[in-house]
Image (cartoon, helix red, strand yellow):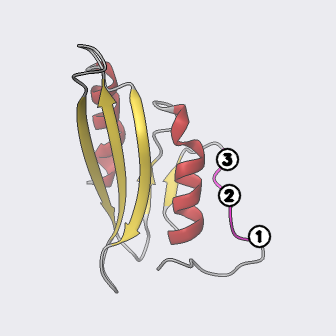
Amino acid sequence: KPEDWHSIAVILYVYGYNYLRSQCAYDVAPGGLLASVYHLTRIEYGVDQPEEVCIKVFASRRNPRIPSVFWVWKSVDFQERESYDMLGISYDNHPRLKRILMPESWIGWPLR
């Protein structure tokens, strides 16, 4: 559930997944859910043996809200903003959630 994502992110960070490799989002199906995807890496035993995890958080198309993990991984800043700009997913508690690629006057979400 989207509301559990922030707690899960903190647990993963404490467990050693301190590198957010990437975040992206996509439209699952026309009229369906939207997904926000996080690729995390843990490098405890050296760069030759990284542990990786991929987390997908699904949100309703009608009111797509997901807790931001900016305060856990600062590198997600522009990536969550791009997902907001292209798909309209609101990342709660993101400090600068505004359009990053499209002009401010753009109406709608180009990748929906």
Taking depth in this image into account, of 80 and 49 the one nearest to the observer is 49
Spatial CA span between label 2 and label 1: 8 Å
Q: CA distance from mark 2 to mark 3?
A: 6 Å
Mark 1 burial class by Cα count in 10 Å: few <14, some 14-19, many 20+:
few
Residue, x 70% and y 70% (percent of image)?
Answer: 102
Which residue is denoted by mark 2 in the rendering?
Answer: 98
Total tally of numbered discs in the picture: 3
Residue 93 image position (x, y, % from top left): 55, 44
What amino acid does circle 3 point to?
Arg
Residue 104 — which label? 1
Question: Could you tell me if the residues under marks 2 and 1 are in contact, i.e. CB atoms within 8 Å?
Answer: yes
Specify the amino acid type for callout 2.
Lys
- Identify whether 9 is placed above or below 57: above
Earlier along the polypeptide chain: callout 3 or callout 1? 3
From this view, report whether residue 38 is shown above or below residue 50: below
User: At 55% across and 69% down in the image, what residue appears?
Assistant: 86
Specify the amino acid type for callout 1: Glu
Kindly state the secondary structure of the residue where label 1 is placed: loop
Question: What residue lies at 34% left-to-right and 29% top-to-bottom?
Answer: 10
Residues under numbered marks 2 and 3 in contact, where contact means CB atoms less than 8 Å apart: yes
Which residue is the site of mark 3? 96
Q: Which residues are magenta?
A: 96-103
Q: Nearer the viewer, residue 83 or 41?
A: 41
Quadrant in the picture for the N terminus: bottom left
CB contact under 8 Å: marks 3 and 1: no
Q: In which image quadrant can residue 41 be found?
A: top left
**Badge 2 or badge 1: first in the primary sequence:** 2
